[in-house]
Amino acid sequence: MNGKSVQDQYAPNSICFGCGPANENGLKIKSYRINNGLEMEFDPVEKHQAFPGVINGGIIGSLIDCHGNWTAAIAIMEKNELESPLCTVTAQYEVKLKRPTPLGHTLKLKSRILGVQEDRAEIVIELKADGKTCATGRGLFVAVKEGHPAYHRWH
């Protein structure tokens, strides 16, 4: 994955647990542009386990949520021909845990844009470990307006 992640490029001061570069205790995911979506890799460590050898479902949900949210932010930015993304939040998302997600493997996530409007996007995400799909997600992410608590979170 080449270049700067979208998080480092557009929100270097974000404190989000999943994707905030400025959160020392967070997951600090790094998502990169691909055709019609984003991709990322994440190397879980022992503290991310639910039980020995298996990653916690909440960690999986955070990866899927943040990666999907950034996919939507970039899609909305491009649709509106903006120089930087609007702050987006999760309106709805679901995670399907297909099989145990093992510790000791790099997790690879790819997202795809299902639909994008001026202020919202629907995204699907797949999480793989060792070439096997462990979880999938689908979400609706919306751009917030001034007055919303998340409006300035990336700036």
Image (cartoon, grey):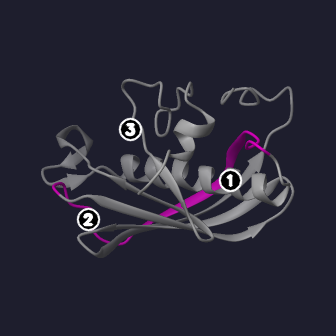
SS at circle 1: helix
SS at circle 3: loop
Residue behind mark 3: 27
Label 2 close to label 3 by CB (< 8 Å): no
Label 1 close to label 3 by CB (< 8 Å): no
The magenta stretch spans residue 48: no
Residue 100 is marked as 2
The quadrant the N terminus occupies is bottom left
Lower sequence index among marks 2 and 3: 3
Question: In the displayed structure, does residue 61 sit left or right of residue 57?
Answer: right
**Cα distance in 3D space between marks 1 and 3:** 20 Å
Residue 95, percent across and down? Answer: 49, 62
| Classed neighbour count for the residue bearing mark 3: other residues with Cα under 10 Å, few (<14), some (14–19), many (≥20) | many
Q: Residue at x 58, y 39 (%)?
A: 9
Q: Which range of residues does the magenta coloring cover?
A: 83-104
Amino acid tagged 2: Pro
Looking at the image, is mark 2 or mark 1 nearer the viewer?
1
Number of residue marks: 3
Question: In the displayed structure, does residue 142 sit left or right of residue 27?
Answer: right
**Cα distance in 3D space between marks 2 and 3:** 19 Å
Residue 55, percent across and down? Answer: 26, 52
Residue 39 is marked as none
Residue behind mark 1: 74
**Cα distance in 3D space between marks 2 and 1:** 30 Å
The answer to whether 112 is drawn above or below residue 61 in the figure is: below
Q: Residue at x 46, y 39 (%)?
A: 18
